[in-house]
Image (spheres, grey):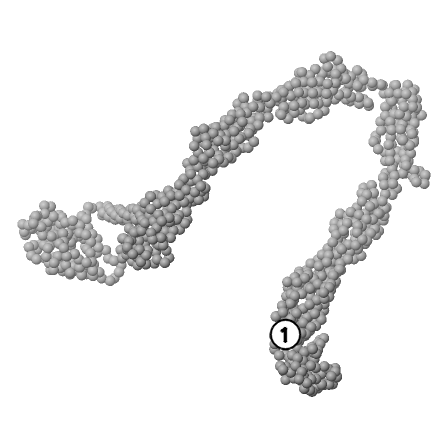
Amino acid sequence: MVRVPDKPSPAGAHGRRWPWAPVGALGSGTGALACPRVGQTRDHAGAELSLRVFGCPLFCVLFLAQANFAPYFFDNGVGSTNGNMALFSLPEDTPVGSHVYTLNGTDPEGDPVSYHISFDPSARSVFSVDPNFGNITLIEELDREREDEIEAIVSISDGLNLVAEKVTILVTDANDEAPRFIQEPYIVQVPEDTPAGSSIAKVRAVDRDTGSGGSVTYFLKNPHSTKFSVDRHSGVLRLQAGATLDYEKASAHFIAVVAKDGGGRLRGASVVLSATTTVTVNVEDVQDMAPVFVGTPYYGYVYQDTLPGSEVLTVVAMDGDRGKPNRVLYSLVNGSDGAFEINETSGAISITQSPAQLRRAVYELHVQVAEVSSAGTPAAQAMAPVTIRIVDLNNHPPTFYGESGPQNRFELSMYEHPPQGEILRGLKITVNDSDQGANAKFNLRLVGPGGIFRVVPQTVLNEAQVTIVVENSATIDFEKFKVLTFKLLAIEVNTPEKFSSTADIVIQLLDTNDNVPKFTSHYYIARIPENAPGGSNVLAVTAVDPDTGPWGEVKYSIYGSGADLFLIHPSSGIIYTQPWASLDAEDTARYNFYVKAEDMEGRYSLAEVFVTLLDVNDHYPQFGKRVQEKTMVLGTPVKIEATDQDAEEPNNLVDYSITHAEPANVFDIDTHTGEIRLKNSIRSLDALHNITPSGDHTWSLEVQAKDRGSPSFSTTALLKIDIIDTEMLSRNPMAAFLMQTKDNPMKAVGVLAGIMAIIVAITVLISTATFWRNKKSNKVLPVRRVLRKRPSPAPRTSGIKWLKFRRTKAADKFVLREDPPNENCNNNSLGSAPPPKVPAPPPPPSVAPSMGPAHWMVPTVSGSLAPQQPHPSPKPKALAKHKAAGRPVQSALVSELRQKFEKKNVHSEAYF
C-alpha cells in the first residue's frame, strides 16, 4: 500500500508533519495506487489516471471523487492545557491521578477521533489518556531531580488515518528536596589555646532543588549555649569573640548545625526544608597548667618504735594538663632539719634518724614538685606543706569482751515488735582500750540497717558496758527479717592511727501473732448453672496470714442474707451449695454474702462473694388460657401472647407459629410479636366467605409458642377468632368500643371510672359554688334556678318553640293553684282547695318533646303548675302573686312564659 499526503498542516502549526493516507481508502471503487515519483497511476482495471504535481516532484496529489483526509491536533501554544502538548510543562509535585492536559484535535470530515499516548519501552509510562475525550492523567509520581524531561508520542486517529507526534514535557521544580550535608561526620581537633575568632571547621550542605529552594543557609541550633558561631552563607564554624577553650573543663564540644533552604512551593503550600548535623570539636590539651597535689593536707606520724629509714607517708602530685601530662619530680625545700628525706620520683617521705634523736614534736616540711618537659628542662612547679608529728606509741586497739573473755560475735533471740526503748538484756558486752589518755578514747556505733537500734554509750574512755536499745519497734518484723545482723564498731577518736575493732551482733527474731489474714481479693465473683445439684462447688477463696505456726492457720466461714444456700470448707475455703439447696434463677438470680478468714486468736478480715446463677431453659412458654377467644376487626390484627418464666435470653424469648388451621391459607402470624392477621389477599368478608363456603364467622387456630432455649420447649393453645367488618363498627360506636375492650376488660372499667370521676367532680364544684353563694347572702332561700344571660345576642327560640308545641296538650294537664295567703301580702283565700304539694325539680327539657304524660312541674314567677292530682297536697310552701282561682290558665301561662323568655329577665326567681 502506498500513502500520499492528504493535506498540508494548518498555517502556523508547530512541528506539523504531512500525514499520509492509503489511496485505496480515498474513494469507493477507485482502488488506485499512487507514488509521488511516478507520473501516472493506474487503477486495478488498468485505466490511466492523471496526476497533478504542485511545484515539487516529491509531493503528488491525487484528486479523487471521494478523499479521506487525516485528522490533526490543535496547537494552542505555550501555557495551554489543551492541544498537542507542545511546550507543555508540569510541576513535579503534581498529585498522581490529576488531570493535567487534554489532547484536542479534529478530523476534516468530522469523523470521530481517538487519542493515544505512548512512551519509549525503556522509559516509564507516566501518563494515561482517555481515547475518547483526550484527557491526560498523571499515573506516576514525578521527580525533577531524577527526570526533568519526559518524551512521549501522542497520536490522533479517525479510524483510517493515524497522526503521531513526538512531544517533550518539561518537569518543573518544586521544593521537595531537603538540604543534605556532605562529608559527614564532622570531627575536628582544636588546641585549647586557639585564639577567639579562629576558623575551626567548615560544613557544607547541598540542595538539589533549583531557585530559592536550592539555596542553603546555615545557623546553629542552640546559639546561646555554645562558644561557637557559623557563617550563614559559607558554613564556616568559628570560635566566638571573647571565648576560650579549656581542656580541663571540657575536652569535647558538640555543635548542632542546621542547614535551611530558601523555601518554595510544594503541593500548593510554601515550605522551608532543613537538615541538621553535629560537629564534634575535640579539644587538644596544651601545657598551660601547673602540677597539682592530690590528697592534701598531708599528715604523718612517727612513733617511738619507728626505725630509721621507715617510710612515714607519701605525697602524690600530677601534671594539671591531663591530656599530655609531663613527668614530675619531688624535693624537700626546707623544714626537715636533716631528719627526713623524699624520693624524687615516688614522693615517699622517710625518717633518717631514730625518733629518740628528734628534738621537735612537730615538723613542718615543704615539698616541691616540678614538671619535666619532653625536652628534659624543668617547667611549671608547685608547693605543698607536710606536717609530721612525733607521738607516743599507740599499740592497743579497742577490744570487745563477753562473759568468758574477748569475743567478736554476740547472739540473741527475741520476739518481734518489742516495746520502744527496751534494752536487749540478753547481750552482755564490754569494750576496753588498754592505752592511756587520748589514745584510749574511742566511739561506738552500730553498722547495719539504720534506725532500728541505738548503742549506749556512744563515746568511751578506756572501758564501758555496752547497751543496745530498741529505737524503731515497727521495723523489727519477723515477716520482713528472720535475722537482724549488725556490726558493733569501736574506732579511736583522737589518735592518728584510728585503731578500730568490730563485733558481730546477730539477733534471731521470734514470730508473734501480729498479722491479720488477708484475702487475695476484696470480692469474688462466681457463676454456676441454676440446675447445679446440691453440694456443687461454687468457687474457692484464699486468705493468707504471714504469721507462722498456729497463728498462720486460717479458718473460713460465711455469713449474710444470701449465705443460706451455701457452705464453706473451714480449711480449704471451697464454697459449695447446701446438699438440699435447689437453685432457681427465676426466683433469685444473684446471691451475695461475706466470707470471713480468722486466725486462732480471732483476728479476721472479710471479703464479699457474688454468685450469679446461669439461667437454664427449664420453663415452658405459657399462654394465659389454653383456649382463647378473640374478635378480629377486618384489617386489624389480634395478638396472642405467651410468657416464659426463664430468667435470661434466649431462654425466655418466644417465637409463635400456627400449627393447624382449616382452611390453612387464611391467617398469618408474626413470629416474634404473636400478631395474627388475615393474609394480604383477603380484604373483605366476601373474600373470606369464598374461602369458607360454610359462611362461618368464627375460625379456630392451633398456635404454638416455642422458646429459643436449648433444648427448646413449646406449648400450644386453641384460638377462636370471630371476624367482623369495619362498617358494622362505624354504624354502632358503642359496639366498636365493646369490641375493642373485649380482650381487655380493664380498659372498659377504666373508661367508666373516668366518666364517673368527671361527673362527681362537676357535682362537687356546683354544690360548692351554691353553698358559698348562699352563705354570702346570709339568708336561707329555697332551691332556685338562676337564668343568666348568654354572651350571644341571638334570641333563644328553642324553649319557646317547645312551649308552643306543648301548649295544646301538655298545658291542659296543669291547673293554677293559689297558695294560702302570705302574711306579708295579706291576701285572702278565695277557694277551699287544699294547697298543692311541693313539686320535684323538673328535668331539663329535650328538644324533641315527649308525647307521654308529663309528671313534672314547671316553675314560674307567679306560681307553680302541677299535674292534676286526685289527692290534695298536705304542705303548701309556694308563694303566689295573683289572686285568680278556678279559671282556665292555659292562655295566661303561655303568655307569661312567652314574656319571660322574650325579655330574658335574668333576675327573676322561681320558688319551688
Q: Residue furthest right?
A: 376
The image quadrant of residue 180 is bottom right
Q: Residue furthest front?
A: 45
Q: In the image shown, does 633 or 1 lie closer to the viewer? A: 1
Percent coordinates x, y for residue 95 in the rendering: 65, 61
Which residue position is annotated with label 1?
159
Q: In this rendering, would 66 be left or right of 731?
A: right
The image quadrant of residue 252 is top right
Percent coordinates x, y for residue 323 in the rendering: 85, 41
Res 190 seen here:
yes
Instruction: Establish if 395 lies above or below 180.
Output: above
Q: In the image shown, does 258 or 385 lie closer to the viewer? A: 258
Q: In this rendering, would 118 be left or right of 853?
A: right
Q: Quadrant of the N terminus?
A: bottom right
Res 740 seen here:
no
Q: Residue at x 56, y 27 (%)?
A: 517
Tally the marks. Answer: 1
Q: Mark 1 packing: few (<14 Cα in 10 Å), some, or many (20+)? A: few
Percent coordinates x, y for residue 602 in the rendering: 53, 23
Q: In the image shown, does 219 or 742 lie closer to the viewer? A: 742
Instruction: Establish if 643 lies above or below 167.
Output: above
Q: In this rendering, would 65 be left or right of 237?
A: left
Percent coordinates x, y for residue 785 in the rendering: 20, 52
Q: Name which residue type carries label 1.
A: Gly
Q: Residue at x 61, y 70 (%)?
A: 132
Q: Residue at x 74, y 82 (%)?
A: 37
Q: Residue furthest top?
A: 404
What secondary structure is marked by label 1?
A: loop
The image quadrant of residue 445 is top right
Q: In this rendering, would 486 be left or right of 885?
A: right
